[in-house]
Amino acid sequence: MPVITYRDALNQALREEMQRDDRVFLMGEEVGVYQGAYKVSKGLLQEFGEMRVVDTPITELGFAGVGVGAAMVGLRPIVEFMTWNFALLALDQVVNAAAKMLYMSGGQYPMPMVFRGPNGAALQLSAQHSQAWESWLAHIPGLKVLAPGTPYDAKGLLKSAIRDDNPVVFLEGEMLYNTKGEVPEEDYLVPIGKAELKREGEHCTIVSHGKMVLVAMQVADQLAKEGITIDVVDLRTIRPMDVDTVVTSVRKTNRAVVVEEGWEFCGVGAQVADYIQRECFDDLDAPVLRVHQADVPMPYAKAIEKAAKPDVRKTIDAVKRVMYLES
Amino acid sequence: MLLQRRFEEKVAEAYALGKIGGFCHLYIGQEAVGTGAISVLRDDDYVVTSYRDHGQALARGITPRAVMAELFGRSDGCSKGKGGSMHLFDRNTNFLGGHGIVGGHIPLATGVAFAIKYRGGDQVCLCFFGEAAVNNGAFHEALNMAALWKLPVIYVIENNRYGMGTALERASAINDIAERACSYDMPNEVVDGQDVFVVREAIARAVTRARKEHTPTLLEMRTYRFMGHSMSDAVSGTYRTKEELEEHMKRDPIEVLRGQMEEMGDWNDENMTTLDNEVREVVEDSWNFADNSPEPSIEALHENVLVDTTSDAEASAAVAGD
């Protein structure tokens, strides 16, 4: 099976879906002539032309709304945000328009569209460029929220998102674009709403999504050397969440740690922990612990930036705490 | 126009009786704008509007029954009772809503026009909003892209002088707001919004430009709202005087039209009375229909949050089979 980058996996998904359905088009800042700020749309302008690969002005609210309008009359827009940090300017369109259109029209206007772009922190980009927005977006009924952590899932989920008749928020990762993994050549889809058990173990469950799946896998590798084996549940889809996979794992391991890039308060991990306490109350041998960004805006200086981010060491500490081991 | 007037008078009555709730913004005084503008459109054109949408919905051909039932929050409403006054939608007449965030729907109209161009069609999209929306970023972003990409959209400012209680002069750095189009090199006009024929002519010019040249237009319709901003707002007294209101009411668009028709010699008081009686019957019927329409079922609460389909059956099967 070919090994390709997360970036190329996304590129393949876009290309294949645009070849498959001429209602699908891509719009956003620098997606065309520049070939994508992160080169995810490389070659697409040349293949599909400027009507289907649309360079927009820096006007996030405006072009997100253009996408919503186009979706109302039957096109299938993919709206790229150069980063989700910039998408805050467009949240009125995502939340007030796209997410609610079907409901407030009594079912008359579905929103077959995707909002996508990098989410979460990269390196030393400081406060305004380093935020993870999934808990904000997943709060909204009417949206599906995806956060793939591997090239395989990135391609399969993006294809599913483009074919879905609902508005889908697709969260990528700047630090993920260069990561590599096996991606089959044949057409495949990863279903929305299905988590995956990425590693099987027996002592503790780590639930994560997006970039933090890589952290969870490293934690599992390291702890395996100490004889501690981990169930790594990759949510892949945050909303609708695959609670069954989480619950099945926690009922087996009796312990859970939730790792996410975002802040603690009202975070995705809070929701996961709530499902676990409801469904696994009698199975738990320890309180559910959470690993997350420090409760501060992201700093610039390297040392304190590192201190702010969730990482392998913090996650190992959390696992050992739920196992009542010395760390 | 008379239907819209009598309909909304009845809406006010229903609101007072508690049959209609929430925010409810009446169009009384502005009827010539929506009526004249929409009368120029073809069936396959599109309309996007703000929350002051009852009159335009009726002008576009949504039945008085479906609109009244929506206002009553009933399952036969044009949005199944889920939208209410501010969110009237109708796929059959390409009426794309009823939107509640000031200015937020203006980019949607640009997107509809983008889709028309994408498909190579010759339809147009008509977008209504109040004059206060021109101070909103969404307005500028939407107009810039429409002009940049040459999209067949007609933006209609209904300048009724007040954004809620704030007069135009207290909100906009320029008073001739049609000039905002100059920033985008977009054709624009100031139009007497109380004269339905003048509205029609201006819209017709814009529609021709949009169909033939894919050029957007910004039209400022000068009009006036005879009622408060919404049902909870006094008609006059706080931000505008009774005298000002009365002065503007002298140019009631229905009376202007009536005068024009009488001058043309094909209209008289008897015709007017007959029409008025007919319209009142239609409105009465819409009330009775709405009143007898069932409330949405409890099951409906959770319906229409998401659709459970994908772009084709193959994809659905693949997803289901995993």
Image: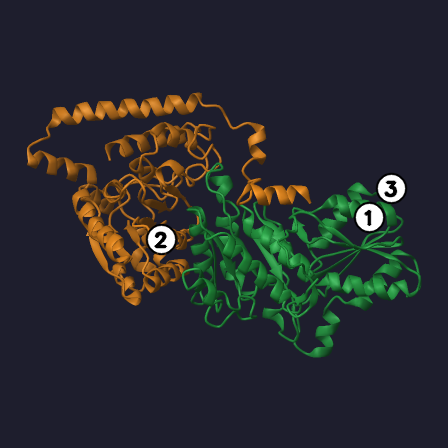
Which callout, 1 or 3, points to the residue nearer the camera? 1
Residue visible at 53% across and 60% down?
A15
Chain letter behind tag 3: A
Front-most of residues B18 and A153: A153
Asked where in the image residue B212 lies, by quadrant, the reply is: bottom left
Residue visible at 18% across and 23% down?
B274
Q: Residue A224, relative to residue B153: is it above or below?
A: below
- Which quadrant of the rendered structure holds the C terminus of chain A? bottom right
Dot label at residue B113: 2
Front-most of residues A314 and A5: A5
Separation of disc 1 and disc 3 at Cα?
Answer: 14 Å
Amino acid type indicated by mark 3: Asp
Asked where in the image residue B242 lies, by quadrant, the reply is: top left
Label 2 near label 1: C-beta < 8 Å? no
Dot label at residue A249: 1
State the SS at label 2. Answer: helix
- Rate crowding at label 2 as few (under 14), some (14 to 19) or many (20 or more) other CA atoms within 10 Å: many
Residue highlighted by disc 3:
A282
**What chain is colored orange?**
B
Colour assigned to chain A in the rendering is green
- Rate crowding at label 3 as few (under 14), some (14 to 19) or many (20 or more) other CA atoms within 10 Å: few
